[in-house]
Image (cartoon, helix red, strand yellow):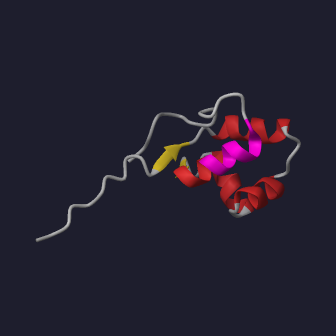
Amino acid sequence: MKTPRRSRASAFVAINGEALREARKQRGLSVEQLATRVGVTKAYISKLELGYSPRCSVTVHASLVQSLRPARSDAFRNDKAVA
């Protein structure tokens, strides 16, 4: 008997790169500083901001929100979830 796979619908969050970049700049952080705070590479933050990686894990999104402290916790989301 096979074990059913869990849905990945909530495993990723669609990111609005422009909003992410704006929030980072408003906080006066460089890409490198934000990457260090979130625990990812500078390249990954750049890819999110430029739209080359249009989604990130829920964990990374939570770290972005914690690091940048936007007015709304869904500030960088493009939609509710991406499969």
Q: Write down the region rendered in magenta.
A: 62-69
Q: Does 75 appear above or below 38?
A: above
Whether the magenta-drawn stretch holds residue 67 is answered as yes
Q: Position of residue 17 (x, y in %)?
A: 65, 41
Query: Residue at 36% of width from left, 53% of height from top?
Result: 8
Q: Position of residue 43 (x, y in %)?
A: 70, 61
In this image, 16 relative to 14: left or right? right
Q: Residue furthest right?
A: 28
Query: Residue at 66% of width from left, 59% of height from top?
Result: 44
In this image, 62 relative to 27: left or right? left
Q: Residue furthest top?
A: 71
Q: Position of residue 81 (x, y in %)?
A: 44, 40
Query: Residue at 31% of width from left, 52% of height from top?
Result: 7
Figure quadrant of the N terminus: bottom left
Q: Residue furthest bottom?
A: 1
Q: Position of residue 67 (x, y in %)?
A: 75, 47
The one nearer the camera, 60 or 25, is 60
Is any part of residue 57 visible from this angle? no
Whether the magenta-drawn stretch holds residue 35 is answered as no
The one nearer the camera, 32 or 9, is 9
In this image, 33 relative to 63: left or right? right
Magenta region, mostly helix, strand or loop? helix
Query: Residue at 70% of width from left, 53% of height from top?
Result: 46
The one nearer the camera, 41 or 5, is 5
> How many numbered marks are there?
0
Is any part of residue 34 visible from this angle? yes
